[in-house]
Each structure stands twice: as C-alpha cells, then as structure tokens.
Image (cartoon, rainbow, N blue to C red):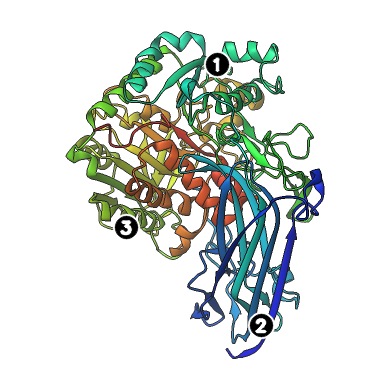
C-alpha cells in the first residue's frame, strides 16, 4: 500500500452565478467563513481473504450504496441563521494516492426486517460489477454540498454540509485520500429576524385537534402553561375555515396541506417550537380527526407503496439554492401532484427494479417539533392527557426513571448467529451508562427473554426508557432465539394490556416494522374480504391480507401509549416496513443506526440542559441526515420519514423539578 503521487483538487460550488436577484460579490456586503483541517493517514483493516476496509480517523460518515465500495467521508456541518444566503462554497484540498492489495469491501445489501426473510444470502458481500470492473473514479465527484433548513438547539438555522470523500479506482485498485482540506464559504448574513411575531404574544406549543376534543384537552393546556410551556389550542375546523378565507399563504391542496400552512403561519406569527397533533382515525372509520400525509416513496419491496409520515408536518421550509430564498416545503418538488414521490417499478421480465424519473427532492429537516396522540375518541384523549400530567408532575428524581429495559434477540437468524437486537441495545446502553442509568437486559442470549411476561415484569418495576430491537407488526413486537428463525418470541399488544405500572411510564423506542402504523382499523378486514374473498386469509407479501394485521383496532404502540393505569408515556417507531442489515454492522445502517443513536442524542442534549422529547427525536433525524444523505437513497429517506413520535413533543423527559 505505497503512496504513488500527491495531486491537488480545487473545487468551486457557485450557488447562484453571483448574479441572481442582484447579488454579487462586487456589490454585496458578503462575509466569509473558513475551515482548515488536516486528515490522518488511512488505516487499512483486513475483512477477509478478498476485501479490506479503509478507515480515516477524521471520517464521521461513509458513502453507503449497496454493492458499491464502502468509502469514508469527512463531513463538516456549518450552521447559519435562517435567511442567510450562500453565495459560493470553495473546497480546496490535496490528495495522496495509494495502491491497495485487496479490493475495498462492498456495502451490505439492506433487507426488509419483515420477519419472514429467510434469505440464505443475508450478509453475503455482493459486488456491483458495473463499478468494480470500471477504471472510473468512484464516486465521480470528490466532494458534494447539501443544504437544509431546520432546528438546532431550538433555533431556526440553515445547515450547510460539505462532504469530502475518498475516490476509488476499482479496476486498478487505487484510492485517493484527501488531506489538508480548506473550505471557504461566502455568504450574505441575515439582516433581520426571519419571523414577524411579537414576543409578548408568542407561544411555545400549539395543539391541533377537532373541536370535539377541546374540553378534554383543557387540563393539559392549563398544566403546560403552569410549567412555562405557553400553549394554545387550534381546532381543525377553524384551520379549514381560515384557509378558505385566505388567511394563510395558500389554501392548500387538501386538508393535510391546509394544516401545514397553518403550522407555517404559527411558526412565523406565534414563534411556536412544538406542534401536538391530537387525533387519529375517527373510531374505526376510515376518516381522520387530524389527517395524515402518506409518503409516495416506493422502497422496492412489494409490501406497500405508501406509509404515514408525520415528518411532513415538521418539515416546513426548504432552501432554494438557485434563488437563495426560503420556501414552503410542500414535498412536491417536481410539481406533479404526488407528495413525497420516489418511484421504482418492477420489471418481471428482466427480474430487476428500475427507477422512473419521478422523484421529489426533499429538505427533510424538522422546522418544528411534532408529535401525535393518535386518539380515536374522547376516552383516548382523557387517558393520555391524564398520563402526561401525572408523568410530568411525579417522575422527577424517582429511582425507577434511571432504569432502562433493553429487549433484543437474533433479528436476522439466517446469517451468522450474531444477535443484532442485542448489539443495538448494547450500543444504546453505552450512551446512557455515563448518566447513571441501570439496565435490565432481556436478551435471548442470556436466557432473560423467553416470553412476554419477562418484559411485563420489567415494565411494572418501572423504567425511564424501554428499547426493543427486532421485528414488528401492528399487533406485536417480536424476535428470534439465536439462529432459530422458525421460533418466535412474541409480545402481542393484548398480552400487555394490563401492565399496571401506573405512573412509572417509560418512553419506548421500538425497532421493527409497522409498530406505529396508527392507520389500522377493523374495517380493513371487511374491505379485504370484499376485495379478495377467502384469498384475503392467505399470506401474500405483495398485497393487503389478514396476517399483515392492518385490521386490528389499534396499532401496538398506540395500544400501549393509550393504556389506562400504565403502558408507555410515548412511543417512537415505524409506520411502515423497516429496513436494516444483519451482523455487527447493524448499528451502522438504516433503522439500527437511528434507534440506537437516539440515546446518544438524549445523552448529549440532556447534558446541555435540553430535556424535551420532540427536540431529541428531531435532532436524531438531523444527525441521520448529516451521516446518510437520505435524498441519495430511498431506504435512508424512508427510515426517517416513517419514524413517528406518538406522544407529546414538549414532554419533559423525567418530569419537572
């Protein structure tokens, strides 16, 4: 692995040609920010007889494309006040070139964590021959730039990501390593506040709910205001009327967009940080108390073409790199009327997927902290309101809060015998241990996870968090014993309906498919039978059927959040099919990274004095975006779009002092 030659790369990203909207470096009072840093020599790690892995100490990300070389990325994040206009970005660095004696290891293929994936090739390294047999540098560009409008420590900012990558010539087995990186950013600073609100009339949180829930929500509003979270209620009926009367920027294409335009109005006129959506389906009917947005991203499975994404409501602004303006993020960048689109089509004749030129490029960064109480009726509202008040008033400084229940097994039992759920649990524990947390590890490997009663007993004892990593459906969470894909350890919602942990309510982070799929309804069974007859009761991966459990009255997570006299205080999980990889790399991809690193974010922010659940949920999404660039991979984008918070985003974790 000998150094051959050093070359220099100077890159310029000219955002607006120095002339759009009259801006130019000649006539504008621009400012400059610089960053200069050196890169260490690469470290080469043998993977097996065929592959090596290249690591760089300063690399905080990787270029991850299934089947393509796994390359380190040096990612730098810059933040500017909202309304900053970036004129140009210059990236200047030298590279050193090395000969390698083995090929760089390819990225793992993601697998659907559906529980029925009996794929003998899980964790088998499969090369994309179109890349490995080419002498073209991969990736083609030595660095790339990304923007995002979002929240950082509660402040609205513009994120600027500069990602410098290594470049690899697979055919000649040569890698170019960057060093001595110099970044220069020229920008027009924000001259005034982006928002118009009078601080004397500001609010921290708005609750959006139908008028029928208003009376039952009053105790929560009083409670929040007493604790300094200035809260107001806005009914869906009033939003729809004011939209019709032209009070907001637009009338919106449908009820969901009307609500999103109101959220934009509330950010700019009330200064809100939190939005609590109170309302799921109207009892078991198909209509909604508070509507949802379905993302139209196809994940190249046959399971479902759409899924709920409350991130839609949170992602309010986008930065237009051409006009340098901040715009409403409607999740329809190609203006074809399909929201959150990313289209893949299966060619059965050729046996492969191909991507249509139909894709929305999204901002994805939360601009407000959003959570949902998916209440079906007034009884649900009264239950969760009472639980939130009791939790915030009573949890502080209680011994039980420092307990964490970790639940995991062999998520991918058809590969190498590694218990992925336990690895993800263990990483989460490593983040929490310095804060003084104690752990109950209910694992298949230590014999502590054999049945649902093991988990119920641990929850009744009290815990601040419960983290389950494995599989899921709307009716259950589940996993496998080690290397035993034919056996399931199931936690059905009906087996956990009387936990009786009263005020000792954990925040649940659940890894698995569909646990937060809160659009389920009994009517789906009737709909399925009318459509398919008795075929509805035969499992079919590619269509709705009985064993996909979309007919249950409430999804697993909402069952436990809305449970009286116990259950969870909040639950974060997937509304659709989850994705990940098997083996020890499970924490470096997709869901395994996001769920385990939620606890890293909690540890970091709580040390800084931030304790609100919605902020931690949103910051975990921001960190995922910084690492994975979700607009470049449909699985990465789905991972954050479907990660819903069923709970109060302003919840003070651990209660008020």
Q: Work out whether residue 637 or residue 142 is closer to the camera in this orientation and state it.
A: 142
- What residue is shown at x 29% (from left), y 39% (from top)? 452
Question: Closer to the N terminus: mark 1 or mark 2?
Answer: 2
Considering every residue shown, the one lying at the far left of the view is 399
Which residue is at 45% across, 58% downward? 587
* Residue 285 badge: 1
Relative to 504, is 467 on the left or the right?
A: right
Nearest to viewer (mark 1 / mark 2): 2
Q: Is residue 391 above or below residue 5?
A: above
Residue 289 visible in the picture: yes
Residue mark closest to the camera, 3 vs 2: 3
Mark 3: secondary structure: helix
Q: Quadrant of residue 628?
A: bottom right
Coordinates of residue 539 in the picture (x, y in percent): 56, 38
Mark number displayed over residue 430: 3
**Looking at the image, is 299 positioned above or below residue 130?**
above
- Residue 92, located in which quarter of the rendered image? bottom right
Looking at this view, is 623 or 425 the one in front?
623
The reply, left or right, for residue 560 in relation to residue 180 is left
Q: What's the distance in space between the residues labelled 3 and 2, CA to CA?
A: 37 Å
**Pointers 3 and 2 in contact (C-beta within 8 Å):** no
Side of 88 relative to 520 (left or right): right
Q: Are there few (<14), some (14-19), or many (20+) residues within 10 Å of tag 3?
A: some
x and y percentages locating residue 51 in the rendered image: 56, 78
């Amino acid at each position: 692995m000998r150094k051959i030659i050093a070359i220099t790369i100077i890159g310029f990203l000219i955002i607006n040609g120095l002339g759009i909207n009259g801006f130019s470096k000649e006539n504008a009072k621009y400012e400059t920010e610089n960053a200069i840093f050196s890169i260490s020599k690469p470290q080469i790690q043998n993977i097996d007889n065929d592959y090596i892995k290249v690591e760089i100490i300063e690399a905080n990300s990787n270029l991850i494309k299934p089947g393509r070389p796994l390359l380190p990325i040096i990612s730098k994040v810059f933040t500017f006040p909202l309304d900053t206009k970036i004129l140009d970005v210059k990236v200047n660095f030298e590279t050193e070139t090395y000969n390698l004696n083995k090929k760089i290891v390819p990225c793992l293929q993601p697998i659907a964590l559906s529980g029925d994936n009996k794929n003998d090739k899980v964790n088998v390294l499969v090369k994309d021959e179109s890349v490995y047999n080419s002498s073209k540098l991969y990736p083609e560009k030595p660095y790339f730039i990304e923007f995002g409008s979002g929240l950082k420590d509660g402040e609205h900012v513009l994120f600027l990501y500069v990602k410098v990558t290594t470049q690899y010539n697979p055919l000649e087995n040569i890698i170019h390593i960057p060093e001595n990186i110099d970044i220069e950013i020229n920008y027009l600073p924000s001259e005034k506040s982006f928002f118009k609100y009078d601080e004397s009339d500001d609010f921290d949180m708005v609750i959006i709910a139908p008028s029928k829930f208003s009376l039952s929500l009053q105790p929560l509003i009083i409670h929040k205001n007493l604790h300094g979270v200035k809260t107001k209620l806005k009914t869906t009926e009033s939003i729809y009327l004011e939209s019709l009367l032209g009070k907001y920027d637009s009338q919106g294409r449908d009820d969901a967009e009307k609500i999103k335009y109101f959220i934009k109005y509330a950010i700019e006129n009330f200064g809100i940080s939190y939005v609590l959506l109170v309302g799921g389906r109207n009892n078991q009917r198909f209509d909604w108390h508070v509507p949802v947005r379905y993302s139209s991203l196809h994940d190249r499975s046959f399971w479902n073409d759409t899924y709920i994404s409350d991130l839609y409501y949170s992602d309010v602004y986008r930065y237009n790199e051409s006009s340098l303006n901040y715009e409403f993020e409607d999740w329809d960048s190609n203006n074809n009327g399909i929201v959150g689109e990313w289209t893949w089509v299966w060619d059965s004749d050729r046996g492969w997927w191909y991507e249509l030129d139909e894709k929305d490029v999204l901002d994805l960064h939360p601009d407000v902290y959003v959570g949902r109480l998916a209440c079906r009726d007034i009884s649900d509202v009264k239950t969760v309101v009472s639980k939130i008040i009791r939790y915030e008033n009573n949890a502080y400084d209680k011994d039980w809060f420092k307990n964490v229940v970790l639940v995991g097994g062999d998520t991918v039992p058809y590969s190498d015998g590694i218990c992925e759920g336990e690895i993800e649990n263990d990483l989460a524990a490593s983040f929490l241990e310095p804060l003084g947390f104690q752990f109950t590890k209910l694992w298949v490997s230590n014999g502590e996870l054999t049945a649902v009663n093991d988990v119920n007993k641990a929850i009744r004892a009290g815990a601040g968090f419960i983290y389950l990593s494995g599989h899921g459906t709307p009716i259950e969470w589940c996993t496998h014993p080690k290397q035993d894909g034919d056996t399931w350890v199931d936690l059905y919602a009906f087996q956990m309906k009387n936990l009786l942990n009263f005020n000792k309510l954990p925040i649940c982070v659940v890894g698995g498919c569909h646990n937060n799929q809160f659009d389920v309804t009994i009517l789906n069974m009737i709909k399925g039978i009318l459509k398919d007859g008795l075929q509805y009761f035969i499992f079919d991966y590619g269509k709705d059927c009985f064993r996909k459990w979309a007919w249950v009255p409430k999804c697993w997570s909402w069952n436990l959040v809305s449970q009286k006299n116990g259950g969870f205080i909040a639950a974060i999980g997937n509304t659709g099919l989850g994705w990940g990889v098997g083996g020890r790399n499970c924490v470096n991809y997709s869901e395994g990274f996001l769920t385990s690193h939620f606890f890293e974010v909690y540890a970091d922010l709580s040390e800084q004095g931030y304790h609100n659940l919605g902020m931690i949920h949103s910051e975990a999404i921001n960190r995922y975006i910084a690492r994975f660039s979700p607009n470049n991979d449909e699985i990465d984008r789905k991972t954050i779009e479907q990660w819903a918070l069923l709970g109060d985003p302003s919840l003070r974790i651990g209660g008020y002092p």
